[in-house]
Amino acid sequence: MKVPQILKQLEALGNESRRKHNAKAGAPANQFGVMLGDVRKVAKKLKPDQALANELWDTGNVEAQLVATLLFKPKDLSADELDRLTRSTTCAQVADWLNSYVVAQHPDKDTLREKWMKSKERWTARAGWNLTASRIAKSADGLDLAALLARLEKELPKAAPEVQWTMNMALGNLGIHHPEFRARVLAFGEKLGLYKDWPVSKGCIPPYVPVWVNAMVQRKA
């Protein structure tokens, strides 16, 4: 299937309500408003295909980029290619799928993490903190956790909203998985107040660090 055919399919699945929702969440005008489940269904009909994925990505269309993240073969991308993709991300939803399905599976992810943690560009910084949050939770060996916490305390309040999301993940994971930093994390999270009024469905845990950390610690007890 060619790119124009895929775009036509995606456009047919779009709706105005979803477009407004996406726009409110920061998506650019180049989007159709397709539900994520329908995006997955379109991708499922296609085979992993690096060339097709690149063509879809380069349209700049949100849904086409989402499909592309499901078609890329991470091990076949060079670190430079992945850096380019990350920098040309169009919105947070695309960034999250790229980080989950491509970046997290890439053999050079930790080298890229170290590079992106120094970046001033929002999407690479978001990806760098996303990888760091995962390391904090799963394999913190080799990380200077005290230095990371100090950096979060200094930089998180003024970071771009796109970067704040994954920095907040790193902060929360420090409090959840590393008890020696928990009191400091909770105090900073309360002082910062980030996502304190974040709406969540009944039974879900909000991303507000004091509530999130305490809920997860109780769940682990």
Image: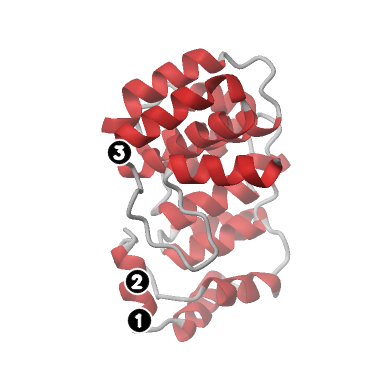
Q: Position of residue 51 (x, y in %)?
A: 62, 55
Q: Position of residue 162 (x, y in %)?
A: 37, 44
Q: Determine which quarter of the picture holds residue 203.
A: bottom right
- Circle nearer the N terminus (3, 2): 2
Judged left or right of residue 210, residue 78 is right
Q: Residue under circle 1?
A: 17
Do tag 3 and tag 1 residues touch (Cβ < 8 Å)? Answer: no
Judged left or right of residue 106, residue 25 is left
Q: CA distance from mark 3 to mark 2?
A: 21 Å
Q: Residue under circle 2?
A: 21
> Residue at position x 36%, y 37% from top?
122
- Circle nearer the N terminus (3, 1): 1
Q: CA distance from mark 3 to mark 1?
A: 27 Å
Q: Is residue 1 visible?
A: no
Question: Hey, what amino acid is under mark 3?
Answer: Ala
Do tag 1 and tag 2 residues touch (Cβ < 8 Å)? Answer: yes
Q: Residue under circle 3?
A: 160
Depicted 177 relative to depicted 18: above or below: above
Colour option used: secondary structure
* Quadrant, the C terminus: top right
Question: Hey, what amino acid is under mark 1?
Answer: Ser
Q: Position of residue 116 (x, y in %)?
A: 47, 27
Q: Position of residue 128 (x, y in %)?
A: 50, 32
